[in-house]
Amino acid sequence: MTKHKNGKQEPQAEQFDPKALLELIAGIQADLDRLKGMVESAVPRFDPANPHNKTVDGKLSEEGVECCYRMFDEGASRYSVARQMKISFAAATHRFNAWRKAGGDKRTRELLG
């Protein structure tokens, strides 16, 4: 304990063991990784043929846009996205440019379903 000018005693800062703290963090990270794997396996894979991917006027819905972006995430070409999503090559090119502007495969993914 240390004394202040006013005569009161104050406890000293406790020393911590960095090795123990790092082990605790590693254990928590392992638990989080395991939980993430469980949740990711429960998320349904996107389906380009899902009718929810388009609105009644034939444009891509929010889910359709995300599905399109996920195909680009996996390395699909604009041509293959256009064919699988049943959209024009120009529409696929527009979505590809929007995907790149949003950060490409580093963007924040939206939830599907």
Image: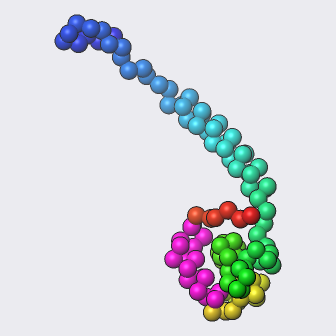
Q: Is residue 1 visible?
A: yes
Q: Residue at x 76, y 59 (%)?
A: 43
Residue in the foreground of this view, choosing between 24 and 94: 94
Majority SS type along the magenta span? helix
Q: Residue at x 47, y 25 (%)?
A: 16
Vertical placement of residue 36 versus 68, above or below: above
Report x, y in % for residue 73: 65, 73
Residue 53, picture quadrant: bottom right
Left or right: 9 as drawn, with respect to 112: left
Q: Residue at x 58, y 64 (%)?
A: 108
Left or right: 27 as drawn, with respect to 19: right
Where's the C terminus, which quadrant? bottom right
Left or right: 43 as drawn, with respect to 9: right
Vertical placement of residue 17 versus 2, above or below: below
In the displayed image of the protein, which residue is found farthest to the left?
5
Report x, y in % for residue 33: 68, 47
Residue 9, picture quadrant: top left
Residue 20, picture quadrant: top right
Vertical placement of residue 110 versus 5, above or below: below
Report x, y in % for residue 44: 79, 62
Range of residues picked out in magenta: 91-107
Q: Is residue 71 visible?
A: no
Q: Residue at x 22, y 7 (%)?
A: 7
